[in-house]
Image (cartoon, rainbow, N blue to C red):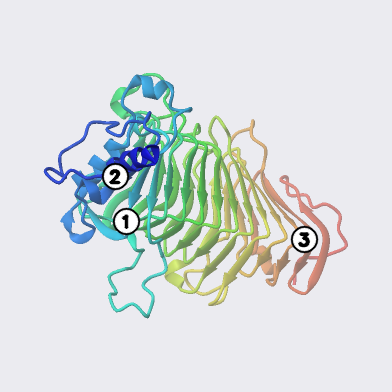
């Protein structure tokens, strides 16, 4: 019986807040990790209010620091140490300065309570000030600022939190392996996982490697929502940023879904993009070239001002779309919808398997500029294209570029095999694509 009482007392003392000074800043690792009961921090126990009005920046950072590692000894044993949980109760937390997670926050888990909703308030709610979730961090700092920054913070998990840029944040989540002014060694911000997060009302949602070259990589995103982002929902800035996995992302009313400046590797499953200008943008293949695989991508636009393109890409990269559905609700030739779905340049290669392509023009292929690169090329397999190829406007090739159709329906014609080679010669085919 005494052992039970002692255990309960120990458990209660772990969660007891100091009544005398709840805002007193704790040192990193205030929670003793050798205490088996010390596994949770509640941000409200450190002074956060979540009432839209109070500046919760310092209270939030104190809670994060309290759950952090204590020093090099903890860092060396971080992989063996249990994760520390930071609990964020339902609320709308006003943030005026960048929140920082660094090496002292490795293997941290931040858990929001109440969930997020990127599609707007439920009609039944009387309080319409809940646009992006019941657990929300709201940026109220300087214009073009960053809400949350993760630096050399590997192994961490974030769940059920909405990041709201209030229309003036530059980046909602910045991920770097090391600080720009501390370019020594490599560091890592890998093995990160994000569940049911929402990113809204900023220039960029997530930016990886903007300030450091290597190792902002190896991340997974599950059921995350992106909305009203004028720049990119997800952006990588280095060819060393590789191995990203997205499961069921929703991207709405934004500029670019995925923007990879210098190659990388990206796998996306069951993504829905509605009224986004560009699905995938790759500026150029880098050291890791670029391999991108989309399965079950659905793109849709219902307004000319949100005219869209599936991929705008250049360089020695490979993109595969399996099960691609493209829907334009206003007609393929209406102003705003006259850009090619695939705008490829300088050796980019795209394969579309099982696509429903309801828009024209389909592709514009620009020539490869380097003799060392393969031709710019796009291949369609088992696709349906309810468009015509009159006057060769649907697919335009220039210089060293070409395309192929295999077992496709084009308009009302079945095309078993058609190839246009980069030198302008056509492979033999019994089917004529001209009207």
Query: Where residue 263 sits: x, y (%)?
Result: 53, 38
Which label was assigned to residue 15? 2
Position of 230 relative to 424 (above/below): below
Distance between the alpha carbons at the discs numbered 3 and 2: 59 Å
Q: Earlier in the sequence, mark 1 or mark 3?
A: 1
Query: Where residue 387 sits: x, y (%)?
Result: 68, 71
Q: Residue furthest left?
A: 20
Few, some or many residues within 10 Å of mark 2 (<14, 14–19, 20+): some
Check disc 3 and report its element: helix, strand or loop. Answer: loop
Q: Earlier in the sequence, mark 3 or mark 2?
A: 2
Query: Where residue 41 sits: x, y (%)?
Result: 31, 44
Q: Quadrant of residue 177?
A: top left
Q: Nearer the viewer, residue 117 or 426?
A: 117
Few, some or many residues within 10 Å of mark 3 (<14, 14–19, 20+): some
Q: Earlier in the sequence, mark 1 or mark 2?
A: 2
Q: Quadrant of the C terminus?
A: bottom right
- Decide: marks 1, 2 in contact (CB < 8 A)? no
Few, some or many residues within 10 Å of mark 1 (<14, 14–19, 20+): many
- The residue that label 3 is drawn on is 382
């Amino acid at each position: 019986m005494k052992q039970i009482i002692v255990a309960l007392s120990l458990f209660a003392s772990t969660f007891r807040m100091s009544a005398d000074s709840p805002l007193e800043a704790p040192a990193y690792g205030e929670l003793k990790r050798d205490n088996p009961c010390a596994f949770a921090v509640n941000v409200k126990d450190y002074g956060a209010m979540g009432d839209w009005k109070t500046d919760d920046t310092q209270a939030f950072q104190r809670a994060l620091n309290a759950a952090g590692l204590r020093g090099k000894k903890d860092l060396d044993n971080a992989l063996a140490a249990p994760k520390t949980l930071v609990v964020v109760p339902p609320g709308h937390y006003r943030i005026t300065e960048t929140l920082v997670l660094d090496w002292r926050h490795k293997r941290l888990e931040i858990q929001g309570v109440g969930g997020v909703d990127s599609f707007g308030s439920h009609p039944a709610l009387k309080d319409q000030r809940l646009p992006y979730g019941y657990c929300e961090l709201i940026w109220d700092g300087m214009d073009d600022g960053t809400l949350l920054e993760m630096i050399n913070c590997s192994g961490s998990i974030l769940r059920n939190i909405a990041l709201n840029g209030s229309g003036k944040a530059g980046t909602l989540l910045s991920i770097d392996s090391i600080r720009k002014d501390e370019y020594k060694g490599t560091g890592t911000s890998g093995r990160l996982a994000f569940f049911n997060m929402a990113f809204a009302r900023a220039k960029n949602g997530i930016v990886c490697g903007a300030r450091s070259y290597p190792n902002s990589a190896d991340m997974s995103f599950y059921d995350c929502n992106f909305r009203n982002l004028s720049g990119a929902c997800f952006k990588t800035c280095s060819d060393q940023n590789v191995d990203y996995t997205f499961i069921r992302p929703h991207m709405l009313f934004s500029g670019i879904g995925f923007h990879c400046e210098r190659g990388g590797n990206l796998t996306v499953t069951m993504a829905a993009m509605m009224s986004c200008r560009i699905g995938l943008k790759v500026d150029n293949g880098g050291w890791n070239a670029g391999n991108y695989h989309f399965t079950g991508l659905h793109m849709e636009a219902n307004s000319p001002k949100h005219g869209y393109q599936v991929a705008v890409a250049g360089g020695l990269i490979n993109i595969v779309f399996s099960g691609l559905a493209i829907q334009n609700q206003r007609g393929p030739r209406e102003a705003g919808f006259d850009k090619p779905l695939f705008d490829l340049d300088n050796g980019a290669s795209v394969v579309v398997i099982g696509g429903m392509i309801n828009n024209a023009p389909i592709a514009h292929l620009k020539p490869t500029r380097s003799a060392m690169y393969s031709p710019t090329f796009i291949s369609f397999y088992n696709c349906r294209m309810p468009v015509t190829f009159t006057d060769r406007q649907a697919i335009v090739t220039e210089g060293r570029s070409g395309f192929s159709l295999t077992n496709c329906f084009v308009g009302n014609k079945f095309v078993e095999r058609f190839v246009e080679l980069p030198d302008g010669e056509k492979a033999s085919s019994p089917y004529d694509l001209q009207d």
